[in-house]
Amino acid sequence: MNKKIVQMKEWELYVYNEKYKLSGRADEHPVLGRNVYVAYTSSVETFELKDDILIYETKNTIYQCPLKYIDINPYKAVTEEYKKQLTHRADKAGNCLDRIIAATAKIANGMGEEDMFAKHILELASVGRKEMEEKVIAENNRLQKIVKQYENSVYIEVSSIECGDKMAYHLGNDLGIVIPHLNCGMFQNSILYMKYATEEDACALDFRYFPKGLNTMETYSWSDNIELAVIKNVRNETIVFNGTKILPEETLVFTPDTHRQGLISPDCYNGKSALFSKKN
């Protein structure tokens, strides 16, 4: 079996009851989608640290974790006493996982400059943070360039329906990016895209949907200034947006009044309504 290779960033290792766990943000996960947070992986089978990259292999996946993209402030959910215990994880002949855990625990406890390996991680992480910031800027610019083609619109490249993906907006003369917020309800979770007006930025918006499993989205709120929702499916399988199927790599444009009955072809969009009906 060919295992999927997943590139990780903002990742951390932890150990509990002598079982290692890896979490972090995956560039592209075979199940969850692109740029998604992986709360924990399945159990590790093999591992090695090579050229400052941790290779962490589970039953189905190989996670590649560059030290420069490690989370240097981990263990937020553990007690101070346990965090101190972790600093001694590699006092004896520990493996590379123990060395990483001990080093990041020392960094978290303000002891990063006292340990050679921890200091090395800090130096790499300084470079990694700058690279990630540059990638975020480039990605935001790319999304805004696309949404700029549509007036009074929002644009989402759908990869992770249950967690949400970045949304670009072009409302009036305003261009920008909104990060999704997961609202955990008692009976149904929802994904919220909300931007409030401020003195410096008068643009506001509200766009929300219910995730119905891994491949279905059902919107329930559009603010009045959003005339179009441009949805591109970047998953490897068909998704459903408000009852309409969207094939992999296909882009469809929806209006709020007809979001359950019709859609607009992005090929014929010219800034005006180019609606064609779609029977349910």
Image (tube, grey):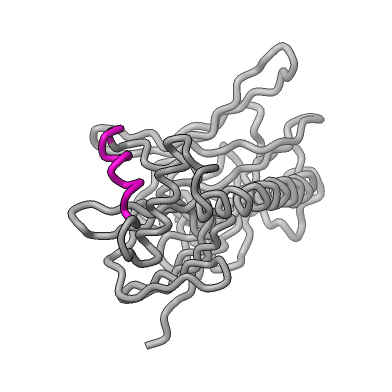
Where's residue 145, x and y in %? Answer: 79, 48
* Residue closer to the observer: 54 or 107: 107
- In the drawing, does residue 271 fall left or right of residue 50? right
Q: How many marks?
A: 0
Res 185 quadrant in image: top left
Queried whether the magenta region covers residue 215, the answer comes back as no
Where's residue 138, x and y in %? Answer: 75, 51
Queried whether the magenta region covers residue 88, the answer comes back as yes
Q: Is residue 256 above or below residue 53?
A: above
Where's residue 168, x and y in %? Answer: 67, 42
- Please state, as top left, top right, bottom left or bottom right, where the C terminus lies in the image: bottom left
Where's residue 279, x and y in %? Answer: 49, 57
Q: Which residue is depicted at the point 51% across and 60% down? A: 8
* Residue closer to the observer: 104 or 183: 104
Question: Which residue is farthest bottom?
Answer: 1
Q: Is residue 236 visible?
A: yes
- In the drawing, does residue 163 fall left or right of residue 89? right
| Main SS, magenta residues | helix
Q: Which residue is depicted at the point 77% across and 57% down? A: 268
> Which range is magenta?
79-89
Q: Which residue is depicted at the point 30% across and 60% down? A: 92
